[in-house]
Structure formats: structure tokens, C-alpha cells
């Protein structure tokens, strides 16, 4: 039986580019006039038509904009320079190769690149059973998530491949968390977990929740993209001792610093703010009233510190 093939279009309309990249039509037209990129052709009806190379470059630009870069400094750059910038390198970027990946992560990356969702979930479940929750999160999920995120930022993974990983690891982490014995009703601290409105990535939150649950904390997860006002209301409603926030590398630094400062002002001094993740803004300057966590391995020590401070 002949296998069906689906021819890939050679160009994309401005509406398609907007849907694919998240960059608005008006912005595309402004960049065209101001920076000389993109440079669309015209279709049979005289409408703008973008080559696939230009669409791919626009995807990279959008990723850099999400990291806080300014359009005027990056839009006109060649794709090679944009890729180096997204890697934080000055030399020519190297493509990800499974053979150079850490041995313990190699099989997982092979499943992602091979679009083997069932195999990926099976290996993840096996890893939880073999490693235990703490090592599974700190030695496997954390470095694998960073690797997947970095590969996506460099354009080495497609969006659907990154989503395959995210959905798989979310399912496995949820099951792992649910398998941890529930703490007694009086256990402390009670921790509210969420992210800022601009932060849609929730894996860091799940990893932190797993380690907090292992330490006997009572965890209330509100998911991602929570308005600050609702965070404050949630803390009050649940009588939370701590609000834990996760920040990915792509978050705008100004949103991070301004948001943490505003949140600190709105919360009672007795409620601690714990901030963690790969966002560089967390480590750029002192954040009064905010506990900035380093690696996930710091969580048990921070919980013990909280309990020592609040011992009766």
C-alpha cells in the first residue's frame, strides 16, 4: 500500500506567519519597513508571502524576544548570529547529537526525537521506580528538561516535540506526586505553588512540588499564569506559610524583578516568598524579602531552615 505524503507549502501568508510565530501582522509590517526584515514576496493576489526560511528566522527572533531582547538589536541579524545569541555563545553553534548526550539521558532524547511517546513514558516510569522520587527529579528530570528547553531555544527541537516531552513528564510527575503519602493536617509549612501571569512553563513547579511533598510539606498548586492579586488572595484563603514561584529562562527580567517586588509589598511579612528556576534575573541583584533558591537540591535544606525558624 502506498504511503500518503503531504507536500509542504513553499511559502506562508502573513496570517499563517502570525499564527505560527505569535508575531502580529502589524509588527511584521513595521519590521519590514524599519529593519528590512522580513522581506516577503507577493502571491497571485498581491498579498504578502513569506518563505519558510524567513518563517524559521522569525521563530528564533520570537524566542529571543521572550528572553527580553529588543527588536532593534536582533531583527536585522543573520540567522547564524541569532542562533548563537539564543545559545549564549559567540562561536558557531553545534547541533545536538544524541551520541554526545549524557549516557543516562540518551535514551530519553532518542524517544523524543523518534516521536515515541509510549516509549518515553515507559522509560520515565521505570526511572521513578529505580531511582526514587528525589533522584528522579534532581538527577533525571531537571537536566533532561534543561536539555530539551535549550534544544528548543536553538531550534533543534520542533514545538510539537517539546510538547510531547512536556505532556509525558507532566503525567509521570503527577503520578509520582500522588504516590507520596499525604502529610498530617498539622504539617508545616503549607506551600502555595504558582507562576507569574507571563510564565506558562509549569515543569519547574511540578518538580518543586514533588520535592516539597517528600519533605512533608502541605502543597497547594494553583498551576501557572496566576495574577498577583489572586496570588495574594490564594495565600490568605489557604493560610499559606510560603508561596513558591518558578521562573523559566525565557521570562522577561523586568517582569520577574518588578513582580517579586510588588508581591512582597502585598503579602504579610510572615509569608515567605521562595523563587527558583533558570531565570538569570533571579541572581542579578539582591531581592529583599525573597528567598532565591539555587538548584532543586536546595529545597530540603530550605524547608528545614523554615522549620527551625518557626519551631515552637
Image: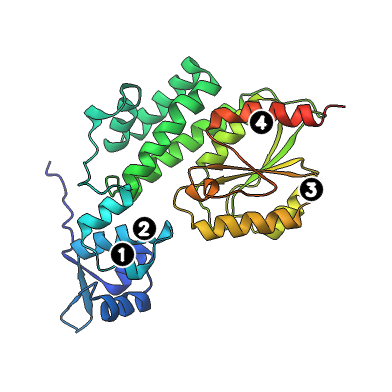
Q: Earlier in the sequence, mark 2 or mark 4?
A: 2
Circle 1 crowding by C-alpha within 10 Å: few under 14, some 14–19, many from 20 = some
Quarter residue 17 falls in: bottom left
Q: Earlier in the sequence, mark 1 or mark 2?
A: 2
From mark 1 to mark 2, how far is it between C-alphas?
8 Å
**Residue 263 rendering spot, x and y as whole percentages:** 69, 55
Residue 95 badge: none
Contact flag, marks 1 and 3 (Cβ < 8 Å): no
From mark 2 to mark 3, how far is it between C-alphas?
36 Å
Q: Secondary structure at mark 1?
A: helix
- Mark yes or no: residue 258 visible: yes
**Residue 116 rendering spot, x and y as whole percentages:** 32, 33
- The residue that appears at 54% across and 32% down in the rendered structure is 296
Q: Secondary structure at mark 2?
A: helix
Residue 302 badge: 4
From mark 4 to mark 1, how far is it between C-alphas?
40 Å
Residue 64 badge: 2
- Mark yes or no: residue 52 visible: no
Above-or-below relation of 245 to 110: below
Contact flag, marks 2 and 4 (Cβ < 8 Å): no
Q: Nearer the viewer, residue 145 or 20?
A: 145
From mark 2 to mark 4, how far is it between C-alphas?
33 Å
Q: Image quadrant for the C terminus?
A: top right
Q: Earlier in the sequence, mark 4 or mark 1?
A: 1
In the picture of the structure, the residue carrying the numbered disc 1 is: 74
Amino acid at each position: 500500500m502506498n504511503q500518503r505524503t503531504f507536500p509542504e507549502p513553499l511559502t506562508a501568508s502573513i496570517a499563517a506567519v502570525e499564527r505560527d510565530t505569535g508575531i502580529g501582522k502589524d509588527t511584521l509590517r513595521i519590521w519590514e519597513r524599519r529593519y528590512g526584515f522580513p522581506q516577503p514576496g507577493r502571491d497571485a493576489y498581491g498579498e504578502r508571502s513569506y518563505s519558510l526560511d524567513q518563517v524559521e528566522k522569525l521563530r528564533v527572533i520570537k524566542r529571543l524576544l521572550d528572553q527580553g531582547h529588543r527588536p532593534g538589536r536582533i531583527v536585522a541579524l543573520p540567522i547564524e548570529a541569532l542562533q548563537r545569541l539564543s545559545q549564549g555563545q559567540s562561536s558557531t553553534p553545534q547541533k545536538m547529537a544524541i551520541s554526545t548526550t549524557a549516557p543516562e539521558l540518551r535514551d530519553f532524547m532518542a524517544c523524543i526525537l523518534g516521536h515515541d511517546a509510549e516509549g518515553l513514558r515507559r522509560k520515565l516510569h521505570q526511572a521513578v521506580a529505580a531511582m526514587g522520587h528525589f533522584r528522579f527529579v534532581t538527577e533525571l528530570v531537571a537536566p533532561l528538561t534543561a536539555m530539551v528547553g535549550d534544544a528548543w531555544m536553538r531550534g533543534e527541537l520542533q514545538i510539537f516535540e517539546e510538547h510531547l516531552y512536556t505532556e509525558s513528564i507532566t503525567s509521570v510527575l503527577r503520578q509520582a506526586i500522588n504516590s507520596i503519602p499525604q502529610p498530617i493536617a498539622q504539617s508545616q509549612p503549607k506551600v502555595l505553588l504558582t507562576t507569574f501571569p507571563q510564565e506558562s512553563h509549569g515543569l519547574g513547579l511540578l518538580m518543586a512540588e514533588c520535592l516539597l511533598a517528600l519533605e512533608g510539606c502541605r502543597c497547594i498548586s494553583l498551576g501557572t499564569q496566576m495574577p498577583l492579586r489572586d496570588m495574594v488572595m490564594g495565600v490568605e484563603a489557604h493560610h499559606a506559610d510560603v508561596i513558591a514561584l518558578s521562573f523559566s529562562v525565557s521570562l522577561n527580567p523586568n517582569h520577574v524583578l518588578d513582580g517579586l517586588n510588588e508581591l512582597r509589598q502585598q503579602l504579610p511579612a510572615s509569608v515567605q516568598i521562595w523563587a527558583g528556576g533558570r531565570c538569570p534575573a533571579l541572581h542579578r541583584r539582591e531581592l529583599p524579602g525573597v528567598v532565591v533558591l539555587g538548584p532543586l537540591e536546595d529545597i530540603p535544606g530550605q524547608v528545614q531552615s523554615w522549620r527551625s525558624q518557626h519551631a515552637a
